[in-house]
Image: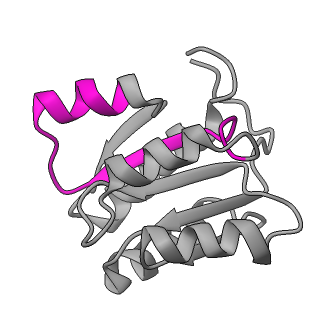
Amino acid sequence: MNTSTTNLYKRLLIIDDDLEDQEIFMEALKEVNASISCYSANTGEDAFRQLETNFTVLPDLIFLDLNMPKLNGKQVLKEIKKNPKLLNIPVIMYSTSFAPRDIEEIGQLGAVHHLLKPSRFDDLCSALKQILALDWNKEN
């Protein structure tokens, strides 16, 4: 595993309906690498609105919650991978739990990784360090 300190990612988008989880994620990201900008969306619809209108430069990496109301994470992932403008952005699924069938399905839909939401802040920081050290645009 390449764990160089090279900053591969400058902009992240987290899509999660839980505002507290978004805040914790952003705090952990600041702890890990304060130079990375992180944007958030509360719903899949909000994310698509932002991706289509607010971003002059698209995110380098998307963290996507699996369980959300209306459009769930799998549906959002499917739409991201259908959009020629977005399909090359690596997507990491992010959830409190994954059933084996979820892991298989999100892999088939194009997610590059899945991250179980850690219960401890330090564990989230460690997980983010590992994830951000890898080049998800290449096969790992």
Q: Residue at x 27, y 67 (%)?
A: 68
Q: Residue at x 89, y 68 (%)?
A: 56
Colouring: one colour
Label total for image? 0
Q: Which residues are magenta?
A: 86-107
Q: Residue at x 45, y 34 (%)?
A: 111
Q: Quadrant of the N terminus?
A: top right
Left or right, residue 10 beside residue 80: right
Which quarter of the figure has residue 119? bottom left
Which quarter of the figure has residue 36? bottom right
Q: Quadrant of the C terminus?
A: top right
Left or right, residue 98 beside residue 89: left
Compare residues 19 and 69 and report the one nearer the observer: 69
Point out residue 135 in the picture as x, y percentages from the top left corner: 68, 29
Residue 138 sits inside the magenta stretch: no
Which quarter of the figure has residue 4? top right
Point out residue 20 in the picture as x, y percentages from the top left corner: 33, 84
Q: Is residue 123 above or below residue 110?
A: below
Point out residue 52 in the picture as x, y percentages from the top left corner: 73, 67
Left or right, residue 22 beside residue 40: left
Q: Residue at x 79, y 45 (%)?
A: 7
Q: Is residue 101 above or below residue 17?
A: above
Residue 98 sits inside the magenta stretch: yes
Compare residues 41 and 135 and report the one nearer the observer: 41
